[in-house]
Amino acid sequence: MYFTDRGIEELEQRRGDEQVTLDWLAERLRAFVDLNPDFEVPIDRLATFLARDDDPDD
């Protein structure tokens, strides 16, 4: 298990039964980057990864 899995597991435990929209997720990612500008590049890469998840060329 990676150290980062702890945060993912907490997310799943706390909010695993909730349904969210991509608009909500995008807004939360923007808010996170506003508070933590050093994470702009990794968050952008995560968003790109999620956006292109069904594209076999990526």
Image (cartoon, grey):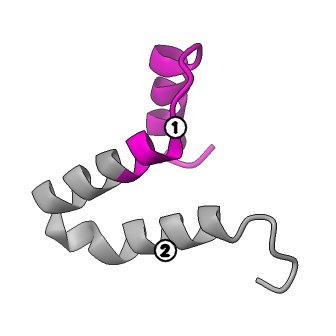
Residue in view at x 52 percent, y 17 percent: 13
Which residue position holds label 2?
45
Q: Secondary structure at mark 2?
A: helix
**Nearer-N-terminus badge (2/1):** 1
Q: Secondary structure at mark 1?
A: loop
Q: Position of residue 11 (x, y in %)?
A: 47, 28
Q: Residue furthest right?
A: 56
Q: Position of residue 23 (x, y in %)?
A: 43, 46
Kindly indicate the quadrant of the structure image that contains residue 9. top right
Q: Is residue 33 above or below residue 16?
A: below
Which residue position holds label 1?
21
Q: Is residue 18 left or right of residue 40?
A: right
Count of marks, rendered view: 2
Residue range of the region highlighted in magenta in the rendering: 1-26
Q: Is residue 16 left or right of residue 29?
A: right
Q: Nearer the viewer, residue 42 or 31?
A: 31
Quarter of the figure with the C terminus: bottom right
Q: Is residue 38 above or below residue 12?
A: below
Kindly indicate the quadrant of the structure image that contains residue 14. top left
Q: Amino acid at mark 1?
A: Thr
Q: Residues within 10 Å of mark 1 (few under 14, many from 20)?
A: few
Residue 7 drawn in magenta: yes
Residue in view at x 57 percent, y 19 percent: 16
Q: Position of residue 34 (x, y in %)?
A: 14, 60
Magenta portion: prevailing SS class? helix
Q: Is residue 46 above or below residue 28?
A: below
Q: Amino acid at mark 2?
A: Arg
- Residue 56 is tagged as none
